[in-house]
Image (cartoon, grey):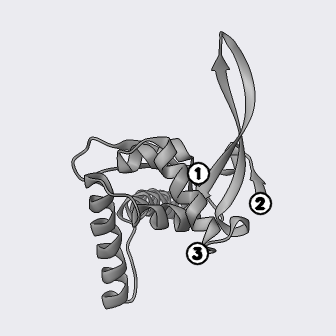
Amino acid sequence: MTKIKPKEMEVEIYKSSDGKVKMEVNIKRDTVWLTQLQISQLFSVQVPAISKHVSNIYKSRELSKDSTLSKMEIVRSEGGRMVNRCESVYSLDMVISVGYRVNSQKATQFRIWATSILKDHLLNGYSINQKLLSKQREKLKELQDAIYFIENKSHQLILKVS
């Protein structure tokens, strides 16, 4: 288990197809990290059910703790004071494994979504992160605008010097 600090993570927003489940997910080392509470919210089941599935996944050696479990230091308010807590977070591999074990409508939606992403990747040879692509497009536009500005200013300077 490695220790991950929240400031080292990027934050993305996950939103279910019906818009009812929204959450922040932590991305680090090319995977998503969720707490048991977040996983329970994702699949609309209680935390003890998630805990049971995680325990069974480790017991059956389907996944190893070394690659799927990490610790995250969080600061939260408890009884009017700020407290540091070390919380377990689980990788996308664990989330997917739990998602295929949980029996709920949200878990079914997740399985359909995960399968469609995998299918697209296998058929196309790549996957597209539309949110990331959109951000990159914005950065590209800013870069193009800056280049255009520099080209115009340098052209004006050349004209003035001549």
Residue 47 in percent (x, y) is at: 49, 42
Residues under labels 3 and 2: Cα distance?
17 Å
> Which one is in front, 51 or 17?
51
In this view, the mark in front (1 or 3): 3
Q: Nearer the viewer, residue 116 or 137?
A: 116
Residue identified by numbered label 3: 62
Which amino acid type is shown beneath numbered disc 1? Glu
Position of the N terminus, as image quadrant, is: bottom right
Q: Earlier in the sequence, mark 1 or mark 3?
A: 1
Residue 88 seen in the figure = yes
Three-letter code for the amino acid on which mark 2 is drawn? Met
Nearer the observer, disc 3 or disc 2?
3
* Disc 1 target residue: 10
Q: Determine which residue is flagged by label 2.
A: 1
Q: Residues within 10 Å of mark 2 (few under 14, many from 20)?
A: few
Q: Is residue 33 above or below residue 162?
A: above
Could one spot residue 157 in this view of the protein? no
Tally of numbered tags: 3
* 24 relative to 2, above or below: above
Residue 99: percent from left, percent from top: 41, 62
Q: Residues within 10 Å of mark 3 (few under 14, many from 20)?
A: few
Few, some or many residues within 10 Å of mark 1 (<14, 14–19, 20+): few
Q: Which residue appears at 44% of the width and 46% of the height?
A: 40
Name the element at disc 3.
loop
What SS does tag 2 mark? Answer: loop
Look at label 3 and name its amino acid: Glu
Distance (Cα) linking label 1 and label 3: 28 Å
Residue 12 place in picture, x, y as percent: 48, 50
Disc 1 to disc 2, C-alpha distance: 20 Å
